[in-house]
Each structure stands twice: as C-alpha cells, then as structure tokens.
Image (spheres, rainbow, N blue to C red):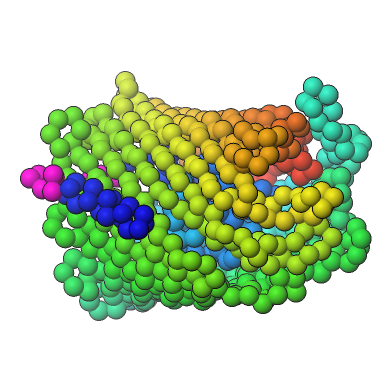
Amino acid sequence: MKKITLFVAMLIIVMLGGLLGQSDSTVTTKTSNTTRVVLTVEDFEKHNCENVGDALNIITGVYINAQGDVALRDVSASKVVVIMDGQKMNVPGSVGVKVSAISINKVGMIELLRGGRSAEYGSDAVGGVIRITTKSKTETDGDMKNWSLGVKGSFGSYGRQIFTLNHSNTINKIDYMLSYRTDGWDGDYEFIQNPYTDPKYGLIAYGSDDRIKHTNNGESTQSSFGKIGIDLPADQKVQLSVSTYVADNGTPGLSYNYTDDARLRFNTESYNLNYDIKEIFKGFSFKAQGLYLKVQTRFDDPTGSTVEIHSNHKNYAQGIDFSQAGTLGDMLDLSYGYSYRNDEINSNEVGDKARITKSAFFTSSVSGAMQGFLSQWEAVLALRYDDPSDFASEVSPRLSLSTGHQGDISTNVTTHITKSYRAPSFNDLYWPRDAYSVGNPALNPEYGLNYDIGLNLTVPVNGMNLNTSINYFRNDVDSLILWAQTAEGGTIWTPSNLAKTSTTGLETSANLSMLDNKVLVNVEYTYMEALNKSPDDDNLYNKYIIYRPKNKLGVTGTLRLKKLECNVIYNWVGLRYDRPANTVWLPAYSLLDANLNYRYSFSGYSGSIILESTNLLNTDFWRTKGTTTPGRMVKLSVGVNI
C-alpha cells in the first residue's frame, strides 16, 4: 500500500508540473553538476589514460582499489552499476566490475551518475552508475573519416609495455571498428613495508621499515573489441559488438602477508546485439537489445598459508531488453520498457546458483518556460519494478526537479530524491564455510534513501569563463549487508543485515578558462562524513566507515601552446580510518603527476607524443593498509593515426 501511495503522489507532482507550464513551453537545456560528470576523449588524452579506471580517477570522490574495482562516496564496487553500450556488466557472483580491465582506446565517453539509481538501472545501483559509450567511427576536427588506422606504443618504468591498434571504416551502409590492446609489466618496484612509523598516527607497525622489492607482481593482459553497424531503410540500424579480456597476473598479497606463488586469472567475454528504429510511430523510437556475458575468475595459491587454494568462478548472464521513447506535445517526454535477465554461477566454492530477474521501467519528463530570472524548469519521474526469482519484488522510485536561467550568466538548480535497493549477491548468500568466512542464506536486500541538491553557475569574468558547482548529498542505508567477524572466537567473517550507515557530504567543482582556452584550471573538493549508524554496538555507533576519507582535493592546471599541451595534476587525500572503532588510521597523502603532450600532423598522418610522470615526488604511502604503490614512474607514449 505504501508503494502505491508513493507512486500516485509522485505521478500527481509530475502531472501538475505539466499543467502549470502549458502556456509557454520549451525544451530545458541540460546543465551538468557534480551528481553527473561526463568525461570525453579529450579528458582521456589530457591525462594519458590507459583504461576506464585511470579516467575515473580524474574525478574526486571516486576511488579505484588495487584490484581495479570502483567505489563512489561511501559504497563499495558491488553497489556501483557499470553499463557499457546499454549492457549491465555486473554479475551477482562477483564483487564488482573491474573498470581497470576496460581499455580506454575503445571508449568515446564515460558518464558518472552519483547517488541511488535503482529506478533507472535496477538492483545494485545503490551508490551510482558508470555509463560507458564505445566509439563507432573516428572523428577528427569534427569531420567523420570513412577509414582510419591508429597505432600507439607506450614504454615505462618497471618494464611497462603497452601496445594498441585501432581501425575503423565505413563502406556504404556498413560501419565497423576494431581494436586490440596488450599491456604488461614486471612490477618489481621497491617499497617500504610500513611507510608510517610515527606513533602520533596511532598505527601499528607491521614488519620492517627497510625498503624491499616486490616479487610475483607481474601482469599480462590482452583485450580486443569489435563493433559493426548496418544502416537499414526507414532509419533503422542493427549493431553487434563483441569484447574480450584475458589476464594472467601475479598476486603478491599484502605487504605483511605475502603470497609469493599466487596467480589471478581473468577471462571475460561480452556480446551485445542492438536493433534501433528512430520512429516506430509518430514521435516514438524503439530499441531492442540482447546480451550474453561470461566472467571467469581463477585464483591459485599452491603454497597457501595453511592449504593449497584453487578457486574457479564462472558467471554467466543472458538477457533481452525492449524500450520505447518519445515525446507527447511540446513538453512531455516518455520512455518505458521491459527486461528479462538470467544470471548463473558455476563455482567450485559457491556451487551452481541462478537468479532470473524480470523488470519493467517507466520515465516521464516534463519541462517548460517560466517568467522572470528563472526561465525554465523540468520535472522527471522514474519508476522501476524488479521481480527477482529468489527475493520479493521491489518498486524503486526517483524524482528529479530542476530550474535555471540561460544567458550571459547561466545557473541551474537540481534536486533528486530516490529510493534504491540491492539484492544479496551469490557470494553473500552461499559462500561455504572455510577457515575464514561463511555466507548467510538468511540475508535480506538492503535499501537506500538518497537526497541530492546541487547548484551550477557559469559566469564570464573579464574575458575568462568560470563554471562552478556545489552539491549536497545524503545517503541513508537500512539493512546494509556488511561482512564482519562473528562471535565465534572473532575469526569467522560472515555477512549480516545488522548495520546501518548515514553519509552526508559536499561535492564542489570550479573550472576557469583564460586566454582563449590556452590556460585552464580545474579544482574539485569533496567533504564527506560516512558514519556507521548500527544500533547494535555502542563502540561502532557514529564511527567513520573505514577507508572513506573525509576530505579529498584535486587540482589540474593546463597550458596549451599551439601543438604542445602541459598538464600538472595534484591530488590530496585526507586520513582514512583502518579500524571500525576509529582507533587506527592512515595519514593524509599528496600526489603530484605531470605530462607533456605534443600533437602533430603532416601529409595525412597525425598523432601524439606524450611524456608522463606519475608520483613525481616519489611519495611512499598506503591507500589502504598493506596495499603498496610504486614510487615515481615515467612513461613515454607515441601514437600515429592515418
């Protein structure tokens, strides 16, 4: 009954908004703010990104761990949905999508959506969504090229070698794109086993402070991608994309608990078939999508701490998705659809499990003009109904309201209210008892309630252009699924629904361009309080969630001189608590990176030469306890396009 009441109330709000604006309507110009960040090829080139993880690291408030998983605000990778060309890459038998495994050379755009998004993207979208759009054709200076070929090689510290090959072509009504990338390094960098020895930090020293060399740290990865599109009569198009990723990596473990012989292997295959028709009837388009996804993870440690470890997890997903979108009148945009997805896992530890999810989704957007300084408004209602085979069905609503002014000085105010949920993963439910952990089949889904309000302002200042934004957010999660040690001697880890969290924060951004875009400055700062609100333990109540920094600052300066571009990137990360009771923490650290990018063109050839240095000041630090990072690294990249 509560779900129906909420649905009716939100629908009335949207309908009233439409009626109030009928006298003078216009399409609202979308304005970005810190809840939505878009990265393009220009950003990837500026920061010399090699994969999607590198690109996301540009954004403050985003954290990529050593395994390549992404965390947003106060939530882990398992609660962030990754979408590539409309296909959900998450599987219920895995912790999260390894964004560092997605090569950047096939990506045209990355869109980061913070906050709960279950209304649009279903279960798991408690913390946010990352939308990745791959390239279809090559664009140069705004002109489409029918045929292109690109080659790039990178050589760097610790034996780093990266080679990429890209080719795209258009033949009559057919266009295609192919890419291949290989990446490897020996990983033999030196590090301090415990970089923090000062007692004032409250840290426990683990082992020696002597500088030692990593072993079993080499990596070897290969990825390929292909996409082909066929234009059909009546504005129809069929598109097929295939991607693969194979990795064979050493896993040295934590700095105080080595795994000298362990190997971690990945094998991912993704197939995506799309059919689009721009107008199936007046004003409405239609899209159908079929997907197949296989994610295999193997971990082998023949000399494990107690016994040999051999884990093999195979995740499979098959699904179909149908959707329509269109406009009624001048103001009302509608989209709706249905999806069916079957997830399966075959694992020597979890066993054979399956989950079928049927979903229906609906989005309504109305917009119009206003009199006075605030010249436009928009209201968006999104609803999603999910019916998983192993849990009760859920309705996830989301309401967004925005208003703004367009002119010499442009401003936009946007607010979101959303409810989201996440069903327990197969690992949460069925992990068999071993010496360290056990799953919990009695788990219930977790629920989140998220509020956002943001202000975006663009002002021309004496020939310069200043764009600023500030966003306040709050995210409350009930029945949070949290792995913790049990009372069984304090050694067995198991998930439960006992914990609650409440996170509030401010995300700010300022961009200043000067001298006809020859000098650019970007500053981003995030303040966040991610607190444990579990009522079951007074020692943990109101304590900060581990490894969620309260403060994070990023500053990027760019100087453009004809074909030469110089970028300097500074990042500062505040202290992170290492213990749930906040008795031990890792201190703040600063990193300085820089690169020089020279773009050239002659006789039909173009390309770039990039000299890059990361951790320029050779800082020793831990992002999390025991996860070492290399010191100063240098890399030279040379690319040629035909």
**Residue 637 horizontal/vertical position (percent):** 62, 49
Identify the image quadrant of residue 189. Answer: top right
Whether residue 118 sits left or right of residue 326 in the image: it is: right
In front: 510, or 559?
A: 510
Span highlighted in magenta in the image? 19-30
Q: Which residue shows up at 42% across the image and 45% down it? A: 36
**Residue 2 horizontal/vertical position (percent):** 36, 54
Count of numbered marks? 0
Whether residue 108 sits left or right of residue 596 in the image: it is: left
Examine the rendering and report whether any part of residue 20 can be seen.
yes
In front: 386, or 496?
A: 496
Q: Quadrant of the N terminus?
A: bottom left
Q: Compared to 37, does 421 lie above or below? A: below
Q: Compared to 271, does 153 lie above or below? A: above
**Residue 50 horizontal/vertical position (percent):** 60, 52
Q: Residue furthest bottom?
A: 233
Residue 213 in the magenta stretch? The answer is no
Q: Which residue shows up at 27% across the image and 32% down it? A: 410
**Residue 264 horizontal/vertical position (percent):** 76, 63
Q: Magenta: predominant secondary structure element?
A: loop
In front: 599, or 615?
A: 615
Residue 24 in the magenta stretch? The answer is yes
In front: 20, or 244?
A: 20
Whether residue 119 sits left or right of residue 597 in the image: it is: left
Q: Which residue shows up at 67% across the image and 71% down it? A: 296
Q: Which residue shows up at 18% across the image and 36% down it? A: 375
Examine the rendering and report whether any part of residue 112 can be seen.
no
